[in-house]
Image: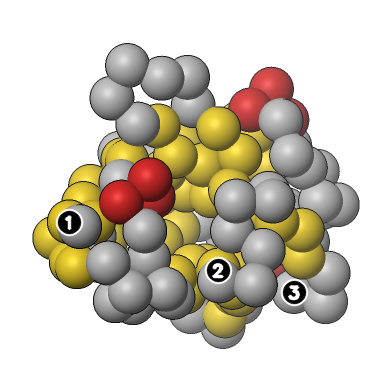
Amino acid sequence: VQLQASGGGLVQTGDSLRLSCAASGRSFTTYAMGWFRQASGKEREFVASINRSGTSTYYADSGKGRFTISRDNAKNTVYLQMNSLKPEDTAVYYCARAKVGLLVTTPQGYEFWGQGTQVTVSS
């Protein structure tokens, strides 16, 4: 399984970005997907998770009301729409495939990780 994240960039406070993560393999619809982020000098933290069918989502408090995770199972792709970006959202964002089909919020619950895409929000 390979995960290819894209869509990061340099934006200003209040701007929006949509991250995409394309997954290889046939089992995409079996597993939940998630987004994590890691700021410089900090530990990787959970951002959002979506179950295998896309009917249930869960967000870290930092992104509630601003971020939306979604998936297109026909395209083997998961997205993270980020609105009203803040400088504290600056980080490398990683997509990951969970070990199960249900929502997962901890890194230990994920088996495969993408390479990360840098998001930088200037003030």
Count of picture labels: 3
Please tell me whether residue 49 is drawn above or below residue 76 in the rendered image: above
Check disc 2 and report the residue beneath it.
Answer: 67
Residue sitting nearer the eye, 63 or 92? 63
The type of colouring in the image is secondary structure
Check disc 1 and report the residue beneath it.
Answer: 122
Q: Secondary structure at mark 1?
A: strand
Question: Which mark sits nearer the N-terminus, 3 or 1?
Answer: 3
- Count residues near mark 1 (Cα–Cα under 10 Å), then give few for <14, some for 14-19, many for 20+: some
The residues bearing labels 3 and 1 have C-alpha atoms spaced at a distance of 32 Å
Q: Residue at x 55, y 71 (%)?
A: 66
Q: Secondary structure at mark 3?
A: loop
Q: Residue at x 77, y 65 (%)?
A: 57
Q: Residue 95 got which mark?
A: none
Hey, what amino acid is under mark 3? Gly
Q: Residue at x 55, y 32 (%)?
A: 45
